[in-house]
Every structure is written in C-alpha cells, then in structure tokens.
Image (tube, rainbow, N blue to C red):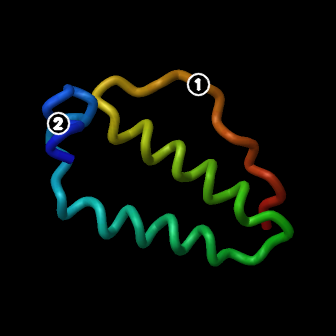
Amino acid sequence: MARARAQGALRDGVTETDVAPIAAMIDAVMALPGERPSDLWRRHLAIILDGLRAQPRQTPLPSPGSVG
C-alpha cells in the first residue's frame, strides 16, 4: 500500500484496515454456488480494484458468467 500510495496509484483515504473486509467480500463471492463462480469473483475484484485506484481504469469488466 505504501508503494501504491507513493506512486499516486491508490486513492486518498484507503487504509490498511480496508484490506481485510475487501478480502472477505471476495471470499464470500467465491463461495457462491453456481456453474462458474470464478467468473463472478473476477468481475467483483475488478470493480473493487478500480474503486481503490486514484484514477480508475475505464476497461470493460469481466463477464458476469452465470449468476444465480
């Protein structure tokens, strides 16, 4: 985090205490039942990472795969 912050890549206000809840969110998504849950967690991780960036990327999100 210190390196990302020093490079200006991490948005202001993000702290080390934010990491554990974010990891728990991804873990919860990975545990969802479905045919292809890996696609779902990759999509949500991309959304989270974009939210942590100082300047979010405007790249297409991974496919949501089969949900529900």
Label 2 crowd (10 A; few <14 / some 14-19 / many >=20): some
- Mark 1 vs mark 2, foreground winner is 2
Quadrant hosting residue 6: top left
Residue drawn at point x = 80 percent, y = 72 percent = 34
Label 1 SS: loop
Per the model, the C-alpha gap separating discs 1 and 2 is 22 Å
Label 2 SS: helix
User: Disc number at residue 23?
Assistant: none
Compared across the picture, whether 58 is left or right of 22 comes to right
Please name the amino acid that badge 2 sits on. Answer: Arg
Q: Are marks 1 and 2 in contact (CB under 8 Å)?
A: no
Compared across the picture, whether 22 is left or right of 36 comes to left
Query: Is 37 located above or below residue 15 in the figure?
Result: below
Quarter placement of the C terminus: bottom right
Please name the amino acid that badge 1 sits on. Answer: Thr
Give 19 or 33, whichever is nearer the viewer: 19
User: For mark 1, what is the residue?
Assistant: 59
Residue drawn at point x = 19 percent, y = 39 percent = 3
Residue, far front:
3
Q: Earlier in the sequence, mark 1 or mark 2?
A: 2
Q: How far from the left and from the top, in percent, is residue 61? A: 64, 36
Give 45 or 67, whichever is nearer the viewer: 45
Q: How far from the left and from the top, in percent, is residue 51? A: 38, 39
Q: How far from the left and from the top, in percent, is residue 37? A: 73, 66
Quadrant hosting residue 23: bottom left
User: For mark 2, what is the residue?
Assistant: 5
